[in-house]
Image (spheres, helix red, strand yellow):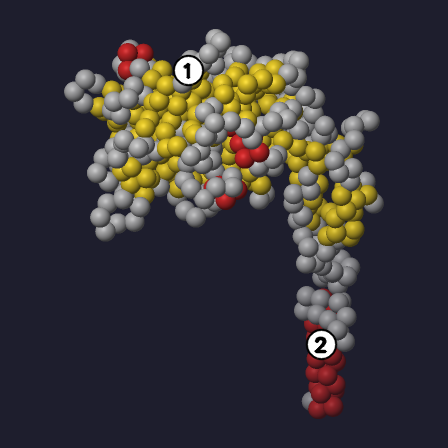
Amino acid sequence: MDIKKVIGSIVIVFAMATLAACNGGGGGSPVNGTPIGNPSNGTPTTPPPAKDDISGCIIGATHSITIITTPGGASATTNATSGCYTIANLPNGDYTVTPSDGSVVFVPKSTKVSLSATVTDVKKINFTNPAPALASGTIVYPCPKAICEKDLSTGSESVAYAMPSNTDAGNIVSMRSTPGTVLYNRWNIPDLMMITLSGASPIPTMVWDESTTTGLTPDCNAYPMLPNMDTVHAGTLGNLMVLPVTCQKPGQNGYINVFMVKMDGTYGYVRVTNDAKESVDSPVFGGFDASTNTLTVLYLNFTGTTTSDIMRTTVTVNQNSNVISKPTVFAKNVSENTAQSVFNSLSVGAHHALSVSQDYKTLAFIRKINGELHIIVKPLAGGKEVDLGIGDRPFWTYNGSGLLLYSVGGIGGTSYVVHKDGTGRKMVTRPSNMSEYNLITAFLSQ
């Protein structure tokens, strides 16, 4: 055997194996720091460009609107119900975002946005659409030393009831089953008053006197805080209100339960919830069955530092005892616990987060979406939720119109009305003498 030939063959085989490893057999390893390529086709492999989103809403939108970015011309169409949009998969760069709807002038006209490795998925790029003004109905609202009305068809403002000179009307809510009748607090007097705003000289009656009522139970002290409560005329049971009540047992932290209370001055009550671990708010009536004296109650149950669940229960009022059903979850992850600060209040009960339509068919509530509060509606019989867009403090009107009144911008913000399907959205002109701190307690009457 020729030793030189054998050694030469081994060297040749080794060299070929090395080349194979470098040119495909090793899966595209770099040489001198340069990508060799994809083993399947030999093309260079580079990381994909960054793709991010720009999103926001058109406040007051009455229909779908096109949103355009320049340069590049990427666009999106707003949701016809919520007025919100997302322009997806944009590479890094500087953009101008502009809503386009014929000759409509939006506020602002456009917004500049920059996307980069450190600024991604930019949200809250919002615009305001100049929605038409509501031109029918009457706003009932608190004004200095009085309860006032504004006729939206004529624009005229008038005093419906002049308060005593030593007080102001606080929050106002309408009695669900009694058109023209309202409840109101007086800022410096701990009571709850009711008045029917018709006739030449309306006279209020007291339905709750905190100065003579020490508490509903030994551990619970109640003070009806409008607008965070609801009322109903429940047939032979009379007028009832449902409200959150602060409770505290010895050696325990304070908590909040729901009580249903008669409005005839007797302070007869049903304790709807009775759990020292619960912290509830914004109770509302969700229906009344006169054949069985059964009332449906919904309320918020805070489940964490930022979220709540909407709970639903029924209360059947009998002569000798009351039957309360086990609460069930109606909707999850709604209205943040921080809503008190959003609504410019430091006390429980000063904001309004739930409202049931006049026909007891639809619940309105708030949920945080992309960092902003949105108005959501859902059928009480169950079904799909509908996002009506940015807003807070929903109030269903009780004038037969089926309109939902809500606010954008908190104290001193803008009020709108809209139907539950997102149609008919209009702006409500603010009365010139409305008490600044009570914008959202206004409501529409006949």
Task: Look at 34% across and 22% down and name the residue there.
Answer: 207
Up-down relation of residue 186 to residue 238 (above or below): below
Q: Residue furthest front?
A: 165
Up-down relation of residue 165 to residue 155 (above or below): below
Task: Look at 54% across and 28% down and name the residue there.
Answer: 144
Distance CA(mark 1)–CA(mark 2): 102 Å
Residue type at tag 2: Thr
- Looking at the image, residue 110 sits to the left or right of residue 265; the answer is right
- The reply to whether discs 1 and 2 touch (Cβ–Cβ < 8 Å) is no
The front one of 57 and 207 is 207
Mark 1 Cα-neighbour bin, 10 Å: few <14, some 14–19, many ≥20: few
What x and y, as percent, mark residue 206?
35, 22
What x and y, as percent, mark residue 323?
23, 24
- Residue under label 1, please give it: 203
Label 2: which secondary element: helix
- Residue under label 2, please give it: 18
The front one of 242 and 285 is 242
The quarter of the rendered structure image containing the N terminus is: bottom right
Task: Look at 51% across and 24% down and name the residue there.
Answer: 146
What x and y, as percent, mark residue 224?
37, 31
Residue type at tag 1: Ile
Mark 2 Cα-neighbour bin, 10 Å: few <14, some 14–19, many ≥20: few
- Res. 432 image quadrant: top right
Label 1: which secondary element: loop
Q: Residue furthest left?
A: 320
- Which comes before the other along the chain, label 1 or label 2? 2
